[in-house]
Amino acid sequence: ASAQAADPTLQVRREAALGGELSPLFYRQPLQVVRGEGAWIHTADGRRYLDAYNNVPVVGHAHPAVVQALSRQAAVLNLNSRYLHPNVVELAERLVASMPAGLDTCVFANSGSEANDLAWRMARVVTGRDGAVVADLSYHGVSEATAAFSTNTYPASARPAHVAVFEAPRDPSDDGMAAAQRVRSARGDLGRAGHDLALLAVDSVFSSAGILTPGSSFMRGLQDEARASGGLFLADEVQAGFGRGGQNLWRFQDFGLTPDFVTLGKPMGNGHPVAALITRREIAEAFVEVDEYFSTFGGNPVSCVAALTVLDVIEQTGLVARSGEVGAQLRAGLESLVPDLRVRGQGLMVGVEIPGAPEFAERLRDNGVLVGTTGPGGGVLKIRPPLIWESSHVEVFLSAFEAALR
Ligand code: PMP
């Protein structure tokens, strides 16, 4: 049923209709994808590739339980979120219950960008300020507000005056004191431009900065200094969340943080678009006194049942712990393959600093494994597979890696 012949015209037609530069594809010879199954992606030329890149299919491509739940609900009813439906309530309850005490209010959206955008709007209302502090080389979304927070997408000279940066933690000596100092300095930059810190947003895996492994002290320093200065703290879990770190469901929990906002997306629906913002009731209430929020599709019954099923699968199959174990195997394997290889990360979010990373990713693809690149100049291999990886997948990965080294 999934057979689909390779279509040699597809790339040219895509470029004509979507714009080449606007919608780039991965790889010199892009993959024409046909079907996904677990950790594997099948292409129209009859090959299959081990997926070591895609975090969205967190419980595996086309997971039968998610597909069944989605299609059942789609066959019954889907509509906007102004009606009472148990899927929506249950998902909000489950998410809120997974958060630290006080993060008691859930708002649904369709993308990480929208969730971050809403956190920003709320932070401005609550603090009465309009400045943001984010990491250098950060990524937080595509809306006008969140694109401004995405400092890896434009040169420093183009940074708007209401956005200031702190340097991401690249050194083991980057502790809480260093973090607090960086936040104070960023706040000084905002002050000179006539702004003050409303929101500090951080992706705790520093994915676009090259996948960093910060210490708890640094992360707490960011949070505490942002709060001490009268601002609010956002843990962007769009990449890091849903167990990828291998210790907790949410990466910010590994550091003992208690954010004012948590945003979720990407893996939340295993490929189905659904996202959320979790915050405290008093923040949400202060916001609705002066503004409003409505998302047509955000939190519809189909999206919510997909997300509920993803949570079920993660829980029932112990994927958080598995991510920790398999991630450790992967990092150890890489380190033993190349003794002085610079391997970073936690759980199944792994960065490998390697000369010629983009070319190396092409060679891995030739050897049947899909990875991405990130960091300055794309110099870091980004390894971020579905969490259902087992030792056997690590072995396939390592032998492809070895072959690509030769
Ligand atoms: N935050 C982070 C950390 C992300 O990685 C992304 C997506 N790459 C986003 C936000 C934006 O999410 P979306 O693409 O769903 O809008």
Image (cartoon, helix red, strand yellow):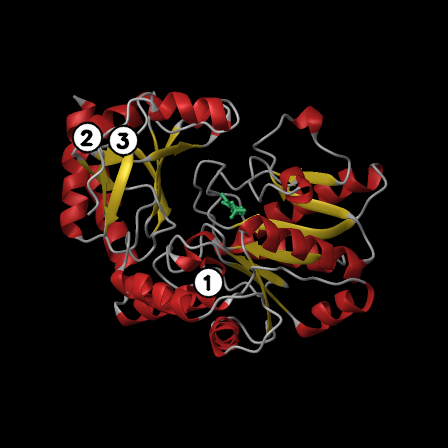
| Disc 2 to disc 3, C-alpha distance | 37 Å
Which amino acid type is marked by label 3?
Asp
Disc 3 and disc 1: Cα gap in Å?
A: 44 Å
Q: Amino acid at mark 2?
A: Asp
Judged from the image, the secondary structure of the residue bearing numbered disc 3 is loop
Disc 2 target residue: 45
Report if residue 225 is visible in the image. Answer: no
Expressed as whole percent of the image width and height from the top left, the position of residue 241 reads 44, 57
Element carrying mark 1: helix
Asked if ligand 1 lies within 8 A of label 2, the reply is no
The residue that mark 3 highlights is: 340
- Which residue, given by chain and number where applicable, does mark 1 sit on? 303
Q: Residues within 10 Å of mark 1 (few under 14, many from 20)?
A: many
Q: Residue at x 25, y 67 (%)?
A: 317
Q: Is residue 81 visible?
A: yes
- Residue at (56%, 56%) from the top-left corner? 235
Report if the beta carbon of the residue with label 3 is closer than 8 angstroms to ligand 1.
no
Quadrant of the image containing the C terminus:
top left
